[in-house]
Amino acid sequence: MRRILHGETFEVIKSSNTSSFLSEENEDIAPRIVLLDESDECCVATEVEQIREHCSETRVVVLTNEYDFDAMVEAFRSGIHGYIVKSIDCDPLIESLKLVHLGEKVMPSELANRFPQHWIDENCATSSHSDLLDLLSDRELETLRFLVVGAPNKVIARSLDISEATVKVHVKAILRKLDVQNRTQAAIWAVRNGISMQQMPVDQLPSPAREETAAV
C-alpha cells in the first residue's frame, strides 16, 4: 500500500496489526481513512467499533482477499465506507479511496453479477442511443456520464463548472426521464446504452481530489 499510494494525494501515517494504535495515548494520530485488512483473525465489526470509539470521523475501508456478498453486507452494517477486493488494479483502487474521502460508499464490481437480469430489464430503459439524445438535454447527458463512474455531486459540479444545486436538479431530471429510482439504476441504464466517460471531452473529465488525505 505504501508503494501504491506513494506520490498520490494520500500519506500513509501508520500501519499496525490492530486498531489499538488509535488509543488515547496517540491522540495526535487521527487518520481520515483506515484501510482494514480482512482476515480470519479480523472481526470487522469489532475493529470498526474500536476505530469509531477513538476517531468518530474516520472512514473505514475493508480490503478483502475475495468477494463475499454476505460478509460485505455485514461489513457495511457495521459502518464501513468501502469494501474492496485486493485483486483490483492500482488506479481503480486509488480512485476508490478518493471517492471514500469525498464521502461516497464504494462496493466491488462483482456486486453487479448479483443483480437479477429481470430487475435490470424492468428497471432500466431500453431506448437506443439516438433515443437517449432526444430524451435528455446535453447537460443532463454530461451529468449521466459522471453517474456511470459514481462521481459525487461535488466532483460533477467542479468538472462542469456549475453549482451542486444545479447538479441535483439535473440528477432528478435524469431519474424522472429514465424512470429509474436512483443513481445506480441510472448508471446501469447508461452502460447498457453505450454511454461512458470516454465520450467526454478531456477538459470535462473529473480531476483528482486535491485534499491531502491521511491513510493507514
Image: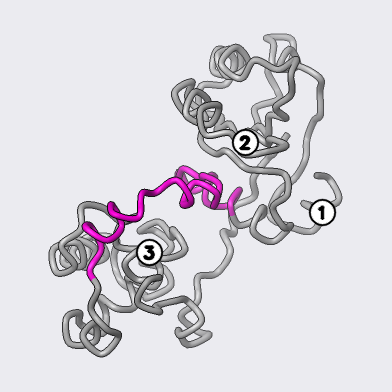
Cα separation between marks 1 and 2:
16 Å
Q: Which residue is mark 1?
A: 6
| SS for dot 3 | helix
The region drawn magenta spans 96-125
What secondary structure characterizes most of the magenta part? helix
Q: Quadrant of residue 86?
A: top right
Look at label 1 and name its amino acid. His
Residue occupying the far right of the picture: 3
Residue depicted at 47% across the width and 76% down the height: 197
Viewer-proximal residue among 23 and 127: 127
Q: Going by the image, does 54 lie left or right of 165?
A: right
* Vertical relation: 35 (above or below) 17: below
Q: Quadrant of residue 140?
A: bottom left
Viewer-proximal residue among 64 and 59: 64
Which numbered disc covers residue 33?
2
* Vertical relation: 107 (above or below) 148: above
Look at label 3 and name its amino acid. Leu
Residue 203: image location, x then y, percent: 50, 84
Residue 37: image location, x then y, percent: 72, 30
Near mark 1 (Cα within 10 A), the count class, few <14, some 14-19 or many ≥20, is few
Cα separation between marks 2 and 3:
24 Å
Q: Which residue is mark 3?
A: 147
Closer to the observer: label 1 or label 3? 3
Verify whether residue 113 appears in magenta: yes
* Vertical relation: 135 (above or below) 155: below
Q: Going by the image, does 49 lie left or right of 186?
A: right
Look at label 2 and name its amino acid. Ile
